[in-house]
Image (tube, rainbow, N blue to C red):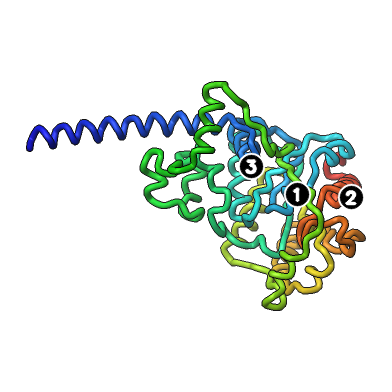
Amino acid sequence: MKRFLKNSVVFAVIIFTLAIIADVMISQGLRLTERGHFSTMNALMNKKMDADLVILGNSRAVGCYNPYILDSILHIDSRNLGVSAQPFGVSYLRWQLYKRNNNKPKLILVNIDFRDLRMVSDGYEKEQYYPYMTDSLVKPYLDLYGFSWAEKYIPMYRYRGDYKLMTIALGELLHLHHDQKGHYYKGYANENLAWNGQNLNEMLKKGKIRGQCEPEAVALLERFLQETQRDSIPVIFVYAPLHNRLKENLKEKKTRKAYQDLSQRYAIPLLDFSTMDISSDTSYFMNGHHVNQKGAEIFSTALAHSIDSLKILNP
């Protein structure tokens, strides 16, 4: 019996050690990939994002703010740090990671939104954090993102069953294949789908859509503004285009007031493009709150000229 227990312990130690080694290898491989949303996170963590202008926000930031157009008109280097399906709680994490790993930008654009004044909402695309679970800034967000105890502390558990992700990681680590599928251009990605009103219809089934305004998120946004003022980094609030049908069915008075109060208190310019000319035309939208590539180009061009007129980048 004693021998059996000894062998069992030795076997367990070997398995645990191999799991640690495999975990490290896969995580190292994922840090090299430029696939989809990994491309933004890895560039952010690998100190490859020094920029003049930084964009924060949710998926509307990811798909609306085209760095190529902003750079061309403003003669700058911009980076889009938008993170899909996540509110300002995650945008603040991205800003903290950027600030620690990269240079101080000349300007920050914050995409304000009827759904953005919340903390972390769910674990959508949480795999982008798999390689960085022990990072001091990422760790406090793991519970908010829905990581279980086992995913946080047991080697390889978070990778369980995801053979595609493990294959991508090993291909990168062994220099067999560099994956750039769905690569985000400087953080910008737009699927350019045709208009589909089904999503909007689902959103409107229960009547008016309520804006969200959690006190904790408002306080975090205010903390962010205090930090940027202390660091002498100008900030602009930007409300990207919405389709008129969605806009007309929004109850966002409380959310708007929170943004306006902060805008006035900290002297933050607020550029509102939510009802610009394209807002009545579905040919510029994929759904009620996401423009397609053509819509993003028109918005980004108008935004660039508005920023230029403020003389913040070139006083």
Q: Position of residue 281 (x, y in %)?
A: 89, 61
Q: Secondary structure beneath disc 2? A: helix
Cβ–Cβ under 8 Å for marks 3 and 2: no
The quadrant holding residue 237 is bottom right
Q: Which mark is residue 298?
A: 2
Residue nearest the observer in this picture, 220 or 174: 174
The answer to which of marks 3 and 2 sits earlier in the sequence is 3
Given residues 161 and 53, the one toward you in this image is: 161
Q: Which residue is mark 3?
A: 37
Residue at the spot of label 1: 63
- Residue depicted at x 57% and y 22%: 176
Amino acid identity at mark 1 = Gly
Name which of mark 2 and mark 1 comes first in the sequence.
Answer: 1
Q: Does residue 235 appear to the left or right of 74 in the view shown? A: left
| C-alpha distance separating marks 1 and 3 | 12 Å
- Amino acid type for the residue under numbered disc 3: His
